[in-house]
């Protein structure tokens, strides 16, 4: 596996690639986050407080709490615990107003992400069971509850052989337009080695979609044409991975960029297989899909499109996500400590 450089990781930040590929991506508005908000996300020791809203429309409670616990735990007047409990909640009025304007301009609903990652593991805490947000408090709740974002905040460069920092200089909030009816079978991961497309994988590998058997050849030609016309030689890394979504009217949209290797999932390939395909030296592209019910990967949670996943109770993914959450967190901890 090729060593990964910090500059390659940096190119995969949404605020870096989106301006280049804006015309062929999901409409997104990006805001630089104040350091005070980053420290708020990193504060694991303080009480779970949501920011004080400057807008009346924000109806979420400021404090996430359990009244029973509060009855069982009481402190005497003047204690240090009481002082901490009564500390003023955080407030980010300028950022909140910016978010409000962006949400309105994007149609009233968005899904949020940081430089690289979305808070997909905390979708269960929202009222919709998804990453759909309409207010700043909903975004803050998802971010504050997410362990996935720890990657961006503390471990983004852990796979780099020239690592010089544990975090980027600045963090950004990307607000992406929410679409309620995207089809998970229409998202694909593309693997590019030395600026040559070598492999394409169905992105959601936990389900068999018969329609993909019928459309496979046409989809391959469509994705190849898109890469030649819109991606090749525009993304500066030689080796990288990116996800695309194909709309009902057969337009191809870039969803995200990732590094070749590192934390990136190779899905229906192994990295060794992708390297071998590249080493053969021809122009063939291997396109892999789940071709029958026996080929699904139930242990690999990809949830495509990740950021639009509906995990509300009874959705089918609800129990699956709950059962795999502990295992995913253990795996993340192991990778972070490697």
Image (cartoon, helix red, strand yellow):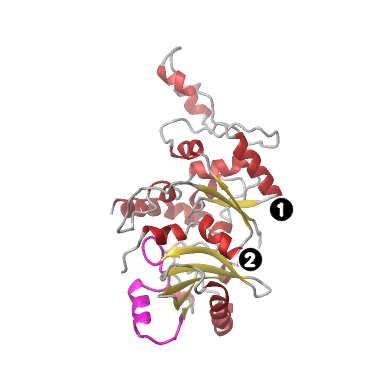
Observer-nearest of 202 and 286: 286
Q: Pick the quarter of the image with the N terminus.
A: bottom left
Position of 190 relative to 173 (above/below): below
- The reply to whether residue 162 is in sight is yes
Residue, far left: 338
- Left or right, residue 129 beside residue 332: right
Q: Position of residue 132 (x, y in %)?
A: 62, 51
Residue, far top: 77
Q: Which residue is mark 1?
A: 107
Observer-nearest of 181 and 281: 281
Classify mark 2: helix, strand or loop.
helix
Position of 60 relative to 191 (above/below): above
Residue, far bottom: 282
- The reply to whether residue 74 is in sight is no
At a point 49% along the width and 68% down the height, the residue shown is: 235
At a point 41% along the width and 70% down the height, the residue shown is: 239
Q: Position of residue 60 (x, y in %)?
A: 62, 36
For the record, the magenta segment spans 260-286
Q: Which residue is mark 2?
A: 23
At a point 37% along the width and 76% down the height, the residue shown is: 274
Which label number is shown at residue 322?
none
First in sequence, mark 2 or 1: give its number. 2
Q: Position of residue 197 (x, y in %)?
A: 46, 78
Q: Position of residue 218 (x, y in %)?
A: 58, 83
At a point 32% along the width and 54% down the height, the residue shown is: 163
Is 272 inside the magenta-drawn segment? yes
Position of 167 relative to 217 (above/below): above
Classify mark 1: helix, strand or loop.
loop
């Amino acid at each position: 596996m090729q060593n990964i450089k910090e500059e390659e990781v940096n190119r995969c930040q949404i605020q870096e690639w989106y301006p280049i590929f804006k015309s062929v991506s999901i409409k997104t508005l990006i805001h630089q986050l104040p350091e005070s908000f980053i420290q708020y996300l990193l504060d694991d020791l303080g009480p779970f407080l949501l920011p004080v809203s400057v807008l009346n429309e924000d109806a979420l409670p400021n404090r996430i709490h359990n009244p029973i616990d509060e009855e069982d735990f009481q402190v005497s007047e003047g204690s240090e615990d009481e002082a901490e409990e009564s500390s003023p909640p955080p407030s980010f009025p300028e950022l909140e107003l910016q978010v409000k304007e962006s949400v309105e301009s994007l149609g009233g609903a968005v899904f949020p992400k940081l430089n690289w990652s979305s808070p997909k593991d905390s979708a269960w805490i929202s009222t919709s069971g998804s990453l759909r947000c309409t207010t700043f408090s909903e975004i803050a709740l998802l971010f504050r509850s997410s362990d996935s974002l720890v990657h961006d905040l503390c471990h983004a460069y852990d796979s780099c052989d020239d690592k010089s920092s544990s975090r980027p200089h600045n963090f950004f909030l990307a607000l992406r337009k929410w679409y309620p009816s995207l089809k998970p079978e229409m998202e694909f991961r593309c693997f590019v080695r030395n600026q040559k497309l070598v492999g394409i994988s169905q992105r959601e590998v936990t389900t068999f979609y018969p329609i993909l058997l019928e459309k496979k050849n046409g989809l391959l030609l469509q994705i190849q044409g898109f890469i030649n016309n819109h991606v090749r030689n525009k993304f500066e890394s030689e080796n990288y991975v990116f996800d695309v979504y194909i709309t009902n009217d057969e337009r191809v949209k870039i969803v995200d960029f990732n590094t070749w290797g590192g934390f990136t999932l190779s899905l229906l390939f192994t990295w060794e297989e992708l390297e071998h395909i590249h080493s053969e030296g021809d122009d063939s592209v291997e396109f892999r899909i789940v071709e029958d019910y026996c080929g699904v990967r139930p242990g690999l949670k990809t949830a495509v499109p990740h950021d639009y996943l509906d995990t509300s109770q009874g959705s089918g993914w609800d129990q699956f996500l709950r059962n795999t959450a502990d295992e995913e967190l253990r795996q993340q901890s192991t990778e972070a400590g490697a």
